[in-house]
Image (cartoon, rainbow, N blue to C red):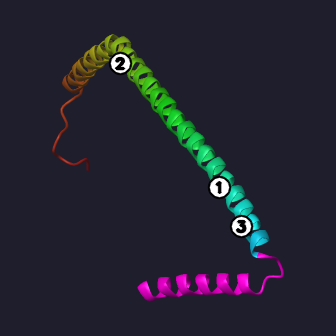
Amino acid sequence: MRSFMEGILFGTVVGGLLGLLNTPRSGKENRAKAKAYLEDNTLAVEDLNVSVQGLRNAIHSLTNEGLASVNAVSEEVTKSIENFTQQAQPRINRINDKIAVLTEDMEKVAASMESQMPAATDAPNQ
């Protein structure tokens, strides 16, 4: 990897020198053009940095708002479930009580029916 980077650096330097030696412009013109190019790119990088910082701030703000919203909704859902459970518990207790009464009544009816049935004979019918 190091030799690759050295090759890139060497190629950049040699290419730059060859470009300067073969240019039809004077050194003064090349310096002015290079200075303008660097200034333009510096401004573009600064604008990009400002935009990236704005994006970071927006993401941070959205993240905080999203977390706050999720927490609020989670608390509301938890409270709703607790309220439902509290309101439904008396109904559930009444249903369980009625099931117990019905079960007792069915057992009494079954016992009553068994006592009223004639005893079955063990001898087969011929």
Q: CA distance from mark 3 to mark 2?
A: 71 Å
Report the front residue among 45 and 76. Answer: 45
Q: Which residue bears the numbered disc 1?
A: 42
Label drawn at residue 34: 3
> Residue placed at 51% from the left, 29% from the top?
65
Element type at marker 2? helix
The magenta segment = 1-26
Residue 8, percent across and down? 55, 83
Q: Residues within 10 Å of mark 1 (few under 14, many from 20)?
A: few
Residue 26, percent across and down? 79, 76
Q: Which of the two discs, 1 and 2, labels the residue nearer the N terminus?
A: 1
Hey, what amino acid is under mark 2? Glu
Majority secondary structure of magenta residues = helix
> Residue placed at 63% from the left, 54% from the top?
45
- Looking at the image, residue 34 sits to the left or right of residue 112; the answer is right
Q: CA distance from mark 1 to mark 3?
A: 12 Å
- In this rendering, the answer to whether 114 lies above or below 96 is below
Foreground tag (1 vs 2): 1
Hey, what amino acid is under mark 3? Ala
- Looking at the image, residue 62 sits to the left or right of residue 106; the answer is right
> Residue placed at 65% from the left, 55% from the top?
42
Label drawn at residue 82: 2
Whether 96 is among the magenta residues is no
